[in-house]
Amino acid sequence: MTRISYLGLGTMGLGMVKNLLSVGHDVTVWNRSANGVDEAVVAGAKSAPTIAEAVRGADFVMYCLSDDTAVRQVVLAEDGLASEVSDTSIVIDLSTISPEVSAEERDAFEARGVRFLDAPVFGSKGEAAAGGLWIVVGGEEDTVSQSLPVLEPISETVHHIGPGGCGVRMKLVGNLVVAAQLLALGESLTLAKSAGLDLSKVLDVLKVTDFRSPIFDGVGATVLAGDYSPSFALKLMQKDARLIQSFAKTLAAPVPSVDAAAGYIDAAIEAGWSEENASALIKAVAADGGVSLQNS
């Protein structure tokens, strides 16, 4: 039986833990707060009071944390994971963080002979619960192969992008596309409403054209319903947009769509929508155009 230590039970973690348990893995969980721990235990996990106890004897240590700060606190702190994990474990970071902090993690683990994969995921709460995430992995090929039994139960697909650091860089490339599509949807619906078009019929067209997108299909309907309940909070998208901008700046790569989206994300957060879904940036676009996109 594969022994897994899973650290962090936020929006994504609890769903992943349940899917790992469902295929028979032995999972021990640790979280900085009590949130999610009882539910994980009811599902069949064990709980540990400290990181050191959680990772003792683990074949794999997995975590999906919210940002660079959380990773520094859980992984890179003096008594954090990097100093506690055994060199017989494989560590898999599923978080969306900066390439710089991911490299710091890798250096800390490799200095102790610990195998490490940067393996951020595409998808949010629903995909995590359904085992339908899309994982992009950076690391040694043999380590990726050994890790498939714990990656496949939480995902629809696993993509080995290249050596260490390639997974986290690919995640930022993908998040650029997400931001651009949300911005495009907000712009197009705002323009359509200003032009007097029926937005339900506009979405019917967007569903069948050669530029159709699952984001347009899923988010479009919720925007018209005025539903911005979070599956991925706007404040986290703000973090991701800033990561993309910083990453692109180091490469002198232009990211005009992300720059524009970031402005609307900031406006939406200033309006008090930080805890709403990332699609709330569309409300900021509509407000800029002086229209409401919600069906009356």
Image (cartoon, rainbow, N blue to C red):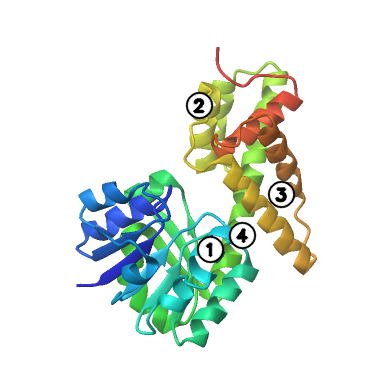
Secondary structure type for disc 1: helix
Comparing 125 with 208, the one in front is 125
Q: Amino acid at mark 1?
A: Gln
Secondary structure type for disc 3: helix
Which residue position is annotated with label 3? 258
Secondary structure type for disc 4: helix
| Disc with the residue nearer the chain's start (4 vs 3) | 4
Comparing 218 with 280, the one in front is 280
Q: Position of residue 15 (x, y in %)?
A: 34, 50
Q: Amino acid at mark 2?
A: Asp
Instruction: Evaluate if marks 2 and 4 touch, with contact meaning CB atoms under 8 Å apart.
Output: no
Cα distance in 3D space between marks 4 and 3:
11 Å
| Disc with the residue nearer the chain's start (1 vs 3) | 1
| Disc with the residue nearer the chain's start (2 vs 1) | 1
Q: Quadrant of the C terminus?
A: top right
Which residue position is annotated with label 1? 73
| Disc with the residue nearer the chain's start (2 vs 4) | 4
For residue 183, side relative to residue 132 (left or right): right
| Disc with the residue nearer the chain's start (4 vs 1) | 1
Residue 279 occupies quadrant: top right
Instruction: Evaluate if marks 2 and 1 touch, with contact meaning CB atoms under 8 Å apart.
Output: no
Q: Which mark is residue 172?
A: 4
Q: Position of residue 48 (x, y in %)?
A: 30, 62
Q: Residue at x 55, y 36 (%)?
A: 275
Which residue position is annotated with label 2? 227
